[in-house]
């Protein structure tokens, strides 16, 4: 289904664009040691820059000249746009109409062309695929691509070096690129992968239950980075997630909002809803780790007005 992935080589390709983000202790009363891997402090504000950088560096010269296109709810699009600008590659980003305003501004600031594609993430994906065919641009898929999965796996390589004693890693589940990449990168270490989904953004979770890709309508959620489908023609991530994920946790909107506010008040961290679901699972008590655990705080791109509302309870 997928060839041998070169995570060490990917780390070299990614390094000019992605920082080695820190891990910090997380105090969980009566629980094993816990750490946060702060991809919320990553260049572009999320782990997505890892997969984008690896994919773009794999492009041949003519492909770079023709440009790239991506569909995104925000973070992947920003990452593609930033890396493309640094490499001198023209970029077009298709986003749903409900994209976070701060993410939309960041994408436009790179000089990339932005296409508002309609009310759903699936429509953004359809528009991107159509434009890629008609204009001859390379599609940079947000998750269902070997190069993107390989790039996201570099996070797991870093984490294993920073916290060699962990026995579990908790991460957000959306399209599955992060779970697949980190799970494959850590598979020889026998580290359990605990995937956390927002109840209002759980297409991958339900698809795994059904054993096939399914579609669900987009729902409004503070974890908008996790929204969208996995594609009825999903080639890679559904099966890879089935192989590497040990356990699933579902968190509620109230859990996520509480985690975003608590991360800011207690740790001075700006964390977006999609990036806070692992913390939400721990702090709400919906998951109790079995051994030393690392929680991937995957993104920090959140609109200021929303953050203020969450933190103040307004």
Image: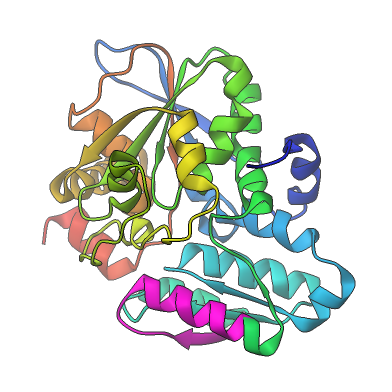
Which x, y percent locates residue 302? 36, 62
Q: Is residue 62 left or right of residue 119?
A: right
Image quadrant assignment for residue 169: top left
Give the vertical position of 218 relative to 174 (above or below). below
Give the vertical position of 114 relative to 267 (above or below). below
Relative depth, front residue between 265 and 197: 197
Give the vertical position of 262 relative to 292 (above or below). below
Q: Is residue 243 left or right of residue 209?
A: right
Q: Is residue 219 left or right of residue 241?
A: left
Which x, y percent locates residue 99? 36, 74
Name the residue at the right extreme: 61
What's the residue at 73%, 50% (across, down)? 14
Name the residue at the left extreme: 314
**Residue 271 appears in the rendering:** no
What's the residue at 51%, 19% (across, down)? 191
The quarter of the picture where the N terminus appears is: top right
Is the image coloured rainbow, by chain, by secondary structure, or in one colour? rainbow
Give the vertical position of 121 relative to 273 (above or below). below
Residue 126 belongs to magenta span: yes
What's the residue at 55%, 48% (across, down)? 236
Relative depth, front residue between 141 and 265: 141
Residue 225 belongs to magenta span: no
Report the span colored magenta.
111-132
Relative depth, front residue between 248 and 158: 248
């Amino acid at each position: 289904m997928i060839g041998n992935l070169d995570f060490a080589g990917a780390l070299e390709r990614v390094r000019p664009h992605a920082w080695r983000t820190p891990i910090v202790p997380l105090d969980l009363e009566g629980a094993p040691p816990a750490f946060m891997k702060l991809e919320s402090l990553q260049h572009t504000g999320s782990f997505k820059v890892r997969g984008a950088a690896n994919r773009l560096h794999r492009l041949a010269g003519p492909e770079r000249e023709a440009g790239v296109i991506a569909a995104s709810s925000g973070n992947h699009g920003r990452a593609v746009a930033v890396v493309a600008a640094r490499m001198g590659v023209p970029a077009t980003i298709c986003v749903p109409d409900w994209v976070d305003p701060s993410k939309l501004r960041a994408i436009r600031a790179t000089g990339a062309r932005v296409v508002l594609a309609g009310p759903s993430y699936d429509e953004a994906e359809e528009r991107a695929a159509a434009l890629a065919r008609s204009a001859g641009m390379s599609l940079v898929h947000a998750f269902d691509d070997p190069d993107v999965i390989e790039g996201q796996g570099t996070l797991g390589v870093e984490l294993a070096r920073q916290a060699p004693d962990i026995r579990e890693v908790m991460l957000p589940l959306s399209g599955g690129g992060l779970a697949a990449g980190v799970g494959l990168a850590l598979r020889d270490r026998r580290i359990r992968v605990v995937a956390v989904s927002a109840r209002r953004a759980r297409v991958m979770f339900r698809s795994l239950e059904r054993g096939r890709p399914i579609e669900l309508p987009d729902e409004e959620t503070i974890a908008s980075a996790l929204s969208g489908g996995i594609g009825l023609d999903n080639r890679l991530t559904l099966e890879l997630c089935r192989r590497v994920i040990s356990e699933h946790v579902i968190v509620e909107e109230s859990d996520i909002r509480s985690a975003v506010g608590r991360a800011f008040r207690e740790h001075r961290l700006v964390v977006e809803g999609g990036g806070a679901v692992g913390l939400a699972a721990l702090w709400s008590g919906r998951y109790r780790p079995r051994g030393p655990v690392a929680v991937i705080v995957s993104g920090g791109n959140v609109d200021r007005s929303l953050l203020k509302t969450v933190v103040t309870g307004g």
